[in-house]
Amino acid sequence: MSLQAEIEKRKTFGIISHPDAGKTTLTEKLLLFGGAIQVAGAVKSNKIKKSATSDFMEIERQRGISVATSVMAFEYRQKKINILDTPGHKDFAEDTYRTLTAVDSAIVVIDVAKGVEAQTEKLVGVCRTRSTPMIVFINKMDREGLDGFDLLDEIETKLGMKACPLTWPIGMGQRFQGVYNIYKGNIRLFSAHGKQTLDDTIEITDLSDPSLDELIGEAAAKELREEIETIQEIYPPFDQEAYELGMLNPVFFGSAINNFGVKEMLDCFVDIAPAPLARHTEEREIEPDENKFTAFVFKIHANMDPNHRSRIAFLRICSGIFMRNTNYYHVRNQKKMKFSSPTMFMASKKDIVETAYPGDIIGLTDSGNFKIGDALTEGETLHFKGIPAFSPEQFRYINNADPMKSKQLYKGIDQLMDEGVAQVFTKLDTNRKIIGTVGALQFDVIQYRLEHEYGAKCTYEPVPMHKACWVSADDPSALTELKSRRKKNLAVDKDDKLVYLAESAWTLKMAEDNHPDVKFHTSSEF
Ligand code: G4P
């Protein structure tokens, strides 16, 4: 198959949601359609769920939350679909932001009873700034929840999306009868825990057809007719170009656990979701059909095996063809590397791959050569954009609790930071290290992993800190002045970039006022 055909075959996307909306359940059903897993019935599938989501880390089992981002691939209707699972837990938001740099589109899962929740808002916000095409799946229609129109309103007002309902529910909860497929003009009737077959689909080309009343009852039929009329008046018809530009968002209704409405969405996804898109670098735009191979690391995953401190670097292929045992150029380290056992993930199982194409995600065993954002090329110097660090929200001093193990501690901290678990800032005045994280949970993760993987012990000390801002100035003397006057607030990040640590919003404002020639940035990419 030609490179172009391989590219067109691929769809790489992420599922985003607030925890508990049903992301894992939906992923599992998608894998089922693709034959990547086989399960009969929903009860068993909950067990599979635990292994379908990756539980590479001990800590995940301990805490019962999905710390890891897993990658799963399956084939459906001659397309190769790569799903990048994203941790919904807010403390791992950075991990999710980075994963979203590696997708070409996203599916947003919303719980019908809860509506748009905080984490969904944040993640959709990230996708919107990148104009990522998104499809919405309203889940748990077998339960009572918000009215369909109210949900569409929330999607528009809270998420800033332009909703375009492509299916519409007939009732909900106890009264849930099925969905009307607006763009195909047919009805699929709901049966709890039922398997969907094409026979369940009843063609209703004209909603005024009296057979609709017999099918779902007079009252429901009347309601459906009115609702569809309202939808056609208020909401725009589907438009492929607007969707691809991130300006129109198809909405589907269903119940993941009952495998209902999932196929409608998957079929539509396969029809409309974009094939691998171009990627931006500081130097130029990379088109997927370029012959030369390029890729970047968007995630580093620790220790599949706690006895070996190896890691897996997840690589998104952006152009050309990746081949096993071939020399590629590691841009940051300026050296050639080849990989004897690159892996691809099929659900929880991984296989060695010989070749991979744009849109594919492969895992490379790494002994510490990679950092997040690293580029691999055939010799060209490229720096991928869009993988910034954001200001952490929580800060603590980290202290060495076992002086005999300081080497292990610093090595551990370095490697955990390369993985993007948290950020470390070294203060200019005292040389002390401050760990910054999005949530409190990472402090425990770091402490646990330092001990179990590096044999080092640490303690934390509170540090009253509000934000870390990366600083820059056109005139270098402005930075020199900042350094001489505010040294105690300055630190360097792991790439030696200068960072201003502000104790409060007020002190940040003061610093900005007193140093008008210095720019304060809330992300490391500016
Ligand atoms: P997440 O990955 O987004 O966190 O959500 P997950 O799929 O784990 O689903 C969260 C809970 O919602 C699970 O129940 C799951 O069974 C349930 N769920 C998912 N889809 C539907 C649906 O369509 N209808 C209904 N009624 N429930 C749904 P749990 O009790 O928290 O977990 P479990 O014991 O079932 O594993």
Image: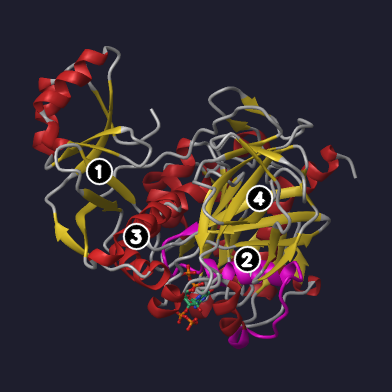
Picture coordinates of residue 500 (x, y %)? 21, 34
Residue type at mark 1? Answer: Thr
What residue is rendered at 34% in x and 63% in y?
Answer: 446
What residue is rendered at 57% in x and 22% in y?
Answer: 283
CA distance for labels 4 and 2: 27 Å
CA distance for labels 2 and 3: 36 Å
Q: Which residue is mark 4?
A: 12
What residue is rendered at 14% in x and 36% in y?
Answer: 489
CA distance for labels 4 and 3: 24 Å
What range of the chain is rendered magenta?
A: 16-44
| 39 drawn magenta | yes
What residue is rendered at 47% in x and 40% in y?
Answer: 387
Mark toward the start of the polypeptide (3 vs 1): 3
The quarter of the picture where the N terminus appears is top right
Residue 479 visible in the picture: yes
**Element under label 1?**
strand
Looking at the image, is mark 1 or mark 2 nearer the viewer?
1
**Element under label 2?**
strand
Q: Which residue is mark 1?
A: 426
Q: Residues within 10 Å of mark 3 (few under 14, many from 20)?
A: some
Q: Which mark is residue 91?
A: 3
Residue type at mark 3? Answer: Asp
Q: Is residue 408 left or right of residue 128?
A: left
Q: Which residue is mark 2?
A: 179
